[in-house]
Image (spheres, grey):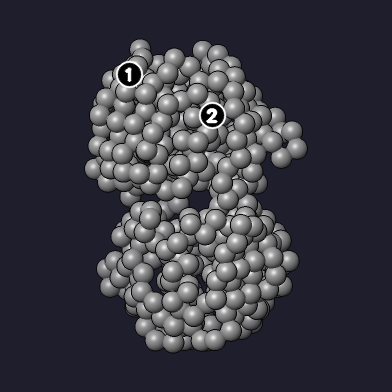
Amino acid sequence: MECFRIVGPTRIRGEVTASGAKNAALPALAASLLSEGPLELSGLPAVRDIRTMRQLLGHLGVESEEQGEVVRLQAGEQTHFDDAPYELVKTMRASILVLGPLVARLGHARVSLPGGCAIGVRPIDQHLAGLEALGAEVQLEHGYVSARAHRLTGGVFRFTAPTVTGTENLMMAACLARGTTVLQNCAREPEIRDLATLLRKMGAHIEGAGSERIEIEGVERLTSASHRVIPDRIEIGTYLLAAAMTGGEIFVRGAISADLAPLLEKLAASGCDLEASNTGLRLSRAGDLKPRDILTAPHPGFPTDLQAQYMALMTQATGQATICETVFENRFQHVSELARMGADIRINGAFAHVHGPTPLSGARVMATDLRASACLVLAGMAAGGETIVGRIYHLDRGYEQMELKLQQLGARVQRLPAEPTRAA
């Protein structure tokens, strides 16, 4: 099982280019199921989840080929491919994104209940209730979702709580529904706006994406389009936090500061210098870190996907910082691993109280999910001595060539084919 070996402490310095957003690329790939013509996507990150989604789409009859940095997808007629089996979707929650497009295009779908990171209960009940509101008959049996509709019909549906993949799934399904669909209490993440931009290029009529209310007027068909996915704000935030934690300086080319506003506000308040430009974002830190509290929330709040990395940063701040996790009830699994490295963190329900600064020391730690993996890599770069981060297959789901990017920033990190044998 592959791992990272990190020797610290290291001060991050240099320039890195942002990869395309995994969470924008996955729904964009699923949108290929809706099109009668080829869909050309660029900026797709070379991460495991993208490979898994392309494999799933191939099983569903979508042909894809790489032409340089462009991936060309052609769905064809798909008259016999509506089944997304457990073997292909067990590692990736975003696989549920094929459900809405399949029902809308074919009138039927059978998709295994998805897997992914074990960070708490993430039900798909809103996806199913939304499809039923559009006229689909939905059944759950033997670990699969079966949905059927001669043709979906526009309607009004209100999410009980904002859900990113739920909003994306129903937005795609509604594009081919008869009449007008109004979705309320929608998620507002930048990745949803990016999907809407792609769907409009394909001929969809969508208004309000990125707001609480989205209106979609159904069309008879969607056609060819070319699209570049937006930069990955979570990857960008991770590298900014790495520089802030190690007292370094970084320029992230391609960063869109407006999509990172909650993080940038906290970084500035904690003592970092930030400079945004048309080409990217620069961060530097020379003085002490100040503790700043955060509360995770759906966009435009502080993203839960940066909570673990921010917690690592706060272990080096002078004083106490309180982190409240409101999105996922089981997303403090990295705390015990940070404690192995010397962090002083106390958990009280949904609150984590981080006391710093604490000198971190290298240790063997185990990644429990995608963002916890990144948190431990950051901690390893700030810690003295050798850190071994195991189970980095989590990391590979969402970060493109992380060790190579960190190496060009001066970090002493390498990928090993297996964890080194412990000394006797």
130 displayed left or right of 224: left
Between marks 2 and 1, how big is the CA–CA gap?
A: 19 Å
139 displayed left or right of 391: left
**How many residues crowd mark 2 within 10 Å: few (<14), some (14–19), many (20+)?**
some
Q: Earlier in the sequence, mark 2 or mark 1?
A: 1
Mark 1 lies on a secondary structure that is loop
**Compared with residue 124, is residue 236 higher up or lower down, i.e. above or below?**
below
- Residue 272's spot in the image, x, y percent? 52, 77
Which residue lies at the image location 47% right of the left edge and 45% below the top edge?
Answer: 191
**Can residue 253 be seen at all in this image of the molecule?**
yes
**Which quadrant is the N terminus positioned in?**
bottom right
Tag 1 residue: 179
- Residue 344's spot in the image, x, y percent? 41, 82
Tag 2 residue: 201
**Can residue 242 be seen at all in this image of the molecule?**
no
**Compared with residue 358, is residue 127 higher up or lower down, i.e. above or below?**
above
Identified by mark 2, the residue type is Lys
In which image quadrant can residue 348 be found?
bottom left
Identified by mark 1, the residue type is Gly
Residue 41 or residue 336, whichever sits in front = 41
Residue at the far right: name it.
68
**Compared with residue 134, is residue 118 higher up or lower down, i.e. above or below?**
below
